[in-house]
Image: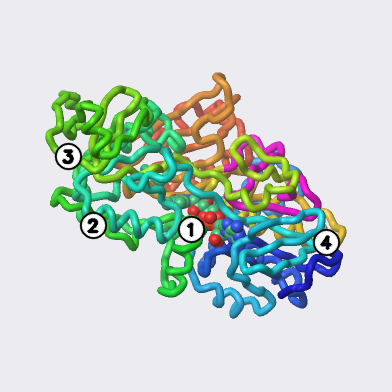
Amino acid sequence: MEAACSPPSAGKFVVVGGGIAGVTCAEQLAIHFPSEDILLITASPVIKAVTNFKQVRDLMLKRKSNLLLTHLPQTHLSNLEVSKVLEEFDVEEQPSTMLGNRFPNIKVIESGVKQLNSKEHCILTEDGNQHIYKKLCLCAGAKPKLICEGNPYVLGIRDTDSAQEFQKQLTKAKRIMIIGNGGIALELVYEIEGCEVIWAIKDKAIGNTFFDVGAAEFLTSKLIAEKPEAKIAQKRTRYTTEGRKKEAQTKANAGNTGSALGPDWHEGLDLKGTKEFSHKIHIETMCEVKNIYLQEEFRISKKKSLTFPRDHHNQLVIADKEIWPVYVELTNEKIYGCDFIVSATGVTPNTEPFLCGNNFDVAKDGGLKVDDHMHTSLPDIYAAGDICTASWQPSPVWQQMRLWTQARQMGWYAAKCMAAASAGESTDMDFSFELFAHVTKFFNYKVVLLGKYNAQGLGLDHELILRCTKGQEYIKAVLQNGRMMGAVLIGETDLEETFENLILNQMNLSAYGEDLLDPNIDIEDYFD
Ligand code: FAD
């Protein structure tokens, strides 16, 4: 048992959470303070480790005298000359002992936090121990927001165990219903084979977290076409489960507080239902779930469900004779029976154990508000990753999204701020918060999202320049007052670095007009 609550000066640097944010934060603290013990408290026996981190070093801007970096503070110039915002890394789920092997001064405690006493600088864990901190970083992630709690036919996908449970259920399924329009739903509808999928979204078009209607149409044609046999090899963040121990798995199941999955989370899973076809998807747009009925409830209700629409455009209503375990009534009055429902409707920050008795400023989305130094509203408590809500005035081309890359960047920067604060020094905002940049893969296309890629918050006076080659690429540049504010690049466009630079340097592009995306002009070369 650790010492009971004593003065904070006697405490350690403590990080809660073994996901990307927490592990990155603990590692950086261990590097900053090699002679101090860093405590990582985590509810799950496996931790997430970032490996093969790559930030493309790029001297392109250095070479250009015509691209003046007028809008950036001077402190960022040297950074900009050598680094890019887009980053790539692999993520491995490892037993927590591996972290201690790499950083002997990190002590991992496998136990959930039960309570936080911020006045006493003290944390109480499920194993009954108390830990005193001098500075604390909360990185407890988020959990799926389910459309309804306690229904055995409604699954949320969050961690390895829930993904495996989903796979198990899918092997017995003929039809499932997916609710939600974010990244997880997008990945699932494309990956699932041998099972009818009814996808209900509340928007007009698919993937509206990431795409406008044009990009959605480009992707929809791929979704309803037959899948290629072999997948295109893709350079991107990879998720592996190598090194995961069976024993660890059992413990994680019990607590249900494992780390969030991430890019390529479905790669190791065989997402196949009971049927032989590749994929069969029907999309119901602009609707939400009105009611969920179990089999017997549905029988008593005397309502009628519909068969799977025969083709994508066929809205012919045919009553379904088949009996299903669960039925979903949508707000457009259609009812479909299915084997189970996947609720992919976003996440809620994991704040419960920390809020009781502690007067944190909490954002509307349930996250702990953090300032531009990742500091919460309470003394000596920082937060990073999915648990927090960025509450500083952001750069005009950055926004928070609960993504893997941002969890890493926040964890890294929080450690830097904690170290600076404990040395009484100040620190500049990290450059990664200058520009929103995300690389992912949807429907086997490489997808790069930059800045205000959906013109978020730009008002009506923005302009979109598009280039689309069916089945190959979709490029959208968002401009305001002649300056590039964001971009969506789908396919192998090779434009990410050029666009990233154009957004960062805010060059006036008015003179180029639509030529900016003229396929006969090599703009990469032009701006080089
Ligand atoms: P987490 O990874 O959730 O880690 C939280 C940690 O806190 C865990 O170790 C947990 O055990 C621990 N914890 C929780 N409560 C307690 C407690 N009370 N006491 C102690 N420890 C506690 N992002 C992308 O960028 N690209 C993608 O393609 C992508 N796909 C995704 C697919 C799925 C299915 C999911 C669920 C997420 C996906 N994400 C993706 C999001 C990404 O995984 C998260 O944004 C990121 O992992 C958040 O990291 P984190 O460290 O903040 O939290």
- The image quadrant where one finds the N terminus is bottom right
The part of the chain drawn in magenta is 374-400
Q: Which residue is mark 3?
A: 323
Q: Earlier in the sequence, mark 4 or mark 3?
A: 3
Image point 43% across, 55% down: which residue?
Answer: 263
Q: Is mark 3 within 8 Å of ligand 1?
A: no
Q: CA distance from mark 4 to mark 3?
A: 63 Å
Residue 230: assigned label: 2
Closer to the eye: label 1 or 4: 1
Mark 2 Cα-neighbour bin, 10 Å: few <14, some 14–19, many ≥20? few
Q: Which residue is mark 1?
A: 256
Which residue is more in the foreground, 21 or 44? 44
Element type where label 4 sits in the image: helix
On the question of residue 222 being in view, the answer is no
| Residue drawn where x is 74% and y is 73% of the image | 2
Residue 91 placed where, x, y %? 48, 63
Q: Quadrant of residue 380?
A: bottom right
Residue 422, numbered circle: 4
Q: Is residue 453 above or below residue 34?
A: above
Disc 1 and disc 2 in contact, CB within 8 angstroms: no
Pointer 2 with pointer 4, Cβ within 8 A: no
Tell me the distance, in whole angstroms, between the alpha carbons under discs 2 and 3.
36 Å
Instruction: Give the mark, 1 or 2, whose residue is nearer the N terminus.
Output: 2
Determine whether, in the image, residue 365 is placed left or right of residue 392: left
Comes first in the chain, label 2 or label 4: 2
The answer to whether the beta carbon of the residue marked 2 is less than 8 Å from any atom of ligand 1 is no
Q: Secondary structure at mark 2?
A: loop
Up-down relation of residue 69 to residue 90 (above or below): above
Q: Residue type at mark 4: give it.
A: Ser
Of 247 and 126, nearer the camera is 126
The amino acid type, in three-letter code, at marker 1 is: Asn
Q: Main secondary structure of the magenta part?
A: loop
